[in-house]
Amino acid sequence: MSVMLQALRAAANTLPQEAHLSKLHLVFGGRVSDPQTLDFKDPANLDVVGIYPDYATAVNAWRSAAQRTVDDAEMRYVVVHLHRLLDPDAEPAS
């Protein structure tokens, strides 16, 4: 397990119970070696757009970041479901 994931899980365990209901999403991007993959060339210099309280807000941020680099095929932005990483045993939403 990565150090970042361990830190995120540890932080989640310190939150009040009602905060665990948040569906946190991370938006980040960077230059990839192949536009068909998520193999980032320089993970140390990823553009972290932010952490958002719900998927819709995260998608809006992703769309905005992706549009800024639309002419650069080597730039990819993604939405990561942090809530799934923080609580992998939780039932997925239908």
Image (spheres, rainbow, N blue to C red):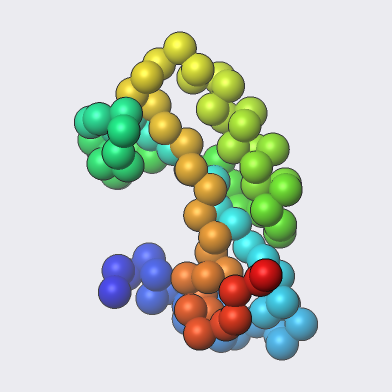
Left or right of 81 on screen, residue 57 = right
Q: Quadrant of the N terminus?
A: bottom left
The residue lying toward the viewer, choosing from 50 and 64, is: 64
Left or right of 7 on screen, residue 34 = left
Q: Quadrant of the C terminus?
A: bottom right
Is residue 84 in view? yes
Residue at the (32%, 28%) spot, across then down = 35
Residue 61, quarter of the rendered image = top right
Residue 24, quarter of the rendered image = bottom right
Residue at the (47%, 71%) spot, across then down = 85
When the figure is inspected, residue 85 is found, relative to residue 67, above or below; the finding is: below
The residue lying toward the viewer, choosing from 69 and 13, is: 69
Provide residue 53's location: percent of width, then percent of height.
Answer: 71, 59
Provide residue 65's location: percent of width, then percent of height.
Answer: 57, 29
When the figure is inspected, residue 58 is found, relative to residue 88, above or below; the finding is: above
Is residue 47 in view? no
Return the residue found at the far right. Answer: 18
When the figure is inspected, residue 66 is found, relative to residue 24, above or below; the finding is: above
Return the residue found at the far front. Answer: 94
Provide residue 23's location: percent of width, then percent of height.
Answer: 67, 66
Residue at the (54%, 27%) spot, across then down = 66
The total of numbered circles placed on residues is: 0
Provide residue 37's location: percent of width, then percent of height.
Answer: 30, 39
When the figure is inspected, residue 23 is found, relative to residue 18, above or below; the finding is: above
Residue at the (53%, 64%) spot, across then down = 82
